[in-house]
């Protein structure tokens, strides 16, 4: 292999804040190099510096040598020869990166028009071939659709098709599978590996998931605060870390084979026996049904589904994108109507109309969303958000009592009192998720529906949030419906796991005697087989 990219003494600063300190590494043709580390360590800034996509307020020094050309010395027009042609980029969130008002065809065609001289008819044929190459069926029809009409996995494949349209020599993949379920993640990563072999591409993989890095990267750089803490062959770094920070990241991860569970340090609970002995579940869903569309286009999202959640129980819900998890949570929350079946919460029927007529019901069932930044009003301070919520639901409370309650909840989620005076954008992702949890707890709910609450967080913050959920469960006597595509996370926090497939619960797993009941259903076995493996022996 020959050297394709050389990064020499690269530094990056925004204003007076230096985010990347002198950094050097090389990347060979056909090689996969991973950058791993916590949020804010400089991974994405390094990638964007290589691609020439840093904002204008960034100050960059050093060298980025790509095939004997220093990219940092080129102007914007000269960089365009490389961007999209020699260097392709797959971004973390395709819905934010794709143009919502342009069709899939128009967006891929822009890359081909910029970097090739192909006539219109040949470009259309090549777009069809690209979409087929990344595993998208009915490519002729799909290229006429818009990003919002596609699933997360389809959008990511479209992004990959754009990135490889001109057969680049370097592909930068920035957290390409963060929000995807395990089977879609596996397909995307295997697709990238196949394309890498076919095109002899070098891949710069950015990820906080050490299991993904372990399976797909040849070399690894561990980053912290803009500096490399450790580097080397991936297997050697992860099996025998030399730096304490690497060991900390490894300990904070949740490898599926380690079979870690929060009850390992507590009195074990026989959940199966507990359910048998229970006479009144907190939440009971019976024969629920929900469809969308009509005629030939009719799609069944929930198909005769039944489940129960006991008081103070954590029920994990896993399944691929499109299996109906989010639809189920919206119906339970009263945000959507069902077509049939019933929901009973604490002995009271739950419907969208019932929520409007009974405000106390709304207080008792709350939801923690995947993206707290999108669910917090960016123009309001945290204090105003908390105060407004209490004035709506507890009008009898005085201003002083409302402030005391806000401070009490901030303390419960381990945030300082001065957080009340700050805005959502002033917090990290993990801090915003703590704020979202505190906001829910202000209403003293009995059930929290957690929809992918840690999927976008790095491993150390994820560990903190999961342990916070466990502490709050005991302190506030909460029950959880914990929705996630990360089975290792669900296995850690849940008392019982429901596997959902095509709108139905196909299997239930129980934790007992430091192990989970085995997967018997073929779909459950397929989910387990798709999870990247990463075993370690660190205590």
Image: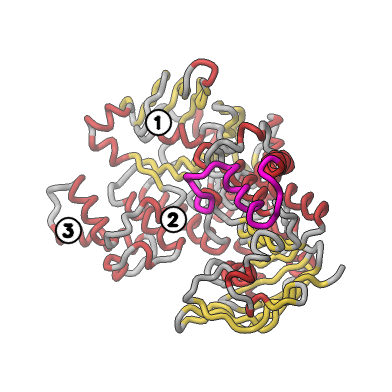
Q: Position of residue 410 (x, y in %)?
A: 33, 62
Give the residue at mark 3: 401
Asked if residue 529 shows in the view, the reply is no
Give the residue at mark 1: 331
Q: Secondary structure at mark 1?
A: helix
For the residues marked 3 and 2, what is the alpha-carbon distance in whole angstroms?
24 Å
Q: Position of residue 368 (x, y in %)?
A: 41, 48
Left or right: residue 39 compared with residue 163? left
For the residues marked 3 and 1, what is the alpha-carbon distance in whole angstroms?
33 Å
Asked if residue 146 shows in the view, the reply is yes
Left or right: residue 375 compared with residue 454? left
Q: Earlier in the sequence, mark 3 or mark 2?
A: 3
Specify the segment rendered in magenta.
96-121
**Nearer the camera: disc 3 or disc 1:** 1
Q: Is-magenta flag for residue 113?
A: yes
Give the residue at mark 2: 471
- Residue 538 is labelled as none
Left or right: residue 315 compared with residue 137? left
Q: Secondary structure at mark 3?
A: helix
Q: Is-magenta flag for residue 172?
A: no
**Nearer the camera: disc 3 or disc 2:** 3
Q: Quadrant of residue 68?
A: bottom right
């Amino acid at each position: 292999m020959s050297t394709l990219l050389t990064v020499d003494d690269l530094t990056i600063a925004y204003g007076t804040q230096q985010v990347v300190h002198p950094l050097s590494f090389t990347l060979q043709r056909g090689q996969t190099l991973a950058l791993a580390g916590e949020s804010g360590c400089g991974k994405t800034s390094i990638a964007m510096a290589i691609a020439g996509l840093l904002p204008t307020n960034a100050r960059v020094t050093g060298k980025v040598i790509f095939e004997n050309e220093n990219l940092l010395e080129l102007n914007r027009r000269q960089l365009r020869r490389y961007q999209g042609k020699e260097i392709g980029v797959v971004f973390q969130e395709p819905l934010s990166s794709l143009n919502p008002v342009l069709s899939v065809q128009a967006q891929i065609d822009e890359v081909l028009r910029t970097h090739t001289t192909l006539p219109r008819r040949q470009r259309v044929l090549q777009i069809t071939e690209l979409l087929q190459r990344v595993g998208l069926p009915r490519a002729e029809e799909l290229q006429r659709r818009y990003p919002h009409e596609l699933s997360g996995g389809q959008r990511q494949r479209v992004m990959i098709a754009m990135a490889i349209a001109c057969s680049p020599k370097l592909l930068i993949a920035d957290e390409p599978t963060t929000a995807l379920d395990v089977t879609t993640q596996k397909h995307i990563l295997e697709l990238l590996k196949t394309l890498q072999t076919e095109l002899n591409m070098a891949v710069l993989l950015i990820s906080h998931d050490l299991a993904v890095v372990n399976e797909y990267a040849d070399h690894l750089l561990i980053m912290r605060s803009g500096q490399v803490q450790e580097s080397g062959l991936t297997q050697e770094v992860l099996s025998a870390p030399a730096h304490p920070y690497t060991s900390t990241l490894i300990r904070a991860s949740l490898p599926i084979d380690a079979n870690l569970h929060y009850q390992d340090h507590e009195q074990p609970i026989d959940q199966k026996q507990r359910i048998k002995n229970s006479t009144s579940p907190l939440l009971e869903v019976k024969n629920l049904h929900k469809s969308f569309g009509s005629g030939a286009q009719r799609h069944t999202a929930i198909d005769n589904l039944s489940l129960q959640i006991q008081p103070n129980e954590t029920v994990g819900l896993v399944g691929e994108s499109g299996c109906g998890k989010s639809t189920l949570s919206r119906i339970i929350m009263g945000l959507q109507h069902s077509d049939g079946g019933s929901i009973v919460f604490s002995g009271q029927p739950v419907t969208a109309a019932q929520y409007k007529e009974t405000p106390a019901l709304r207080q008792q069932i709350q939801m923690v969303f995947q993206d707290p930044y999108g669910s917090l009003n960016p123009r309001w301070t945290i204090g105003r958000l908390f105060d407004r919520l209490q004035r709506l639901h507890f009008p009898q409370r005085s201003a002083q009592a409302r402030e005391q309650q806000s401070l009490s909840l901030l303390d419960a989620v381990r945030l300082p009192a001065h957080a009340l005076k700050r805005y959502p954008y002033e917090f990290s992702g993990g801090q915003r998720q703590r704020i979202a949890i505190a906001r829910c707890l202000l209403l003293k709910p009995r059930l929290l529906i957690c929809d992918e609450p840690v999927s976008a967080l790095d491993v150390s913050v994820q560990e903190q949030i999961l342990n916070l959920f466990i502490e709050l469960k005991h302190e506030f006597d909460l029950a959880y419906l914990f929705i996630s595509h990360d089975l290792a996370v669900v296995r850690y926090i849940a008392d019982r796991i429901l596997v959902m497939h095509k709108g139905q619960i196909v299997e239930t797993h129980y934790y007992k005697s430091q192990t989970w009941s085995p997967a018997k259903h073929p779909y459950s076995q397929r989910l387990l087989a798709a999870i990247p493996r990463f075993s370690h022996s660190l205590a």
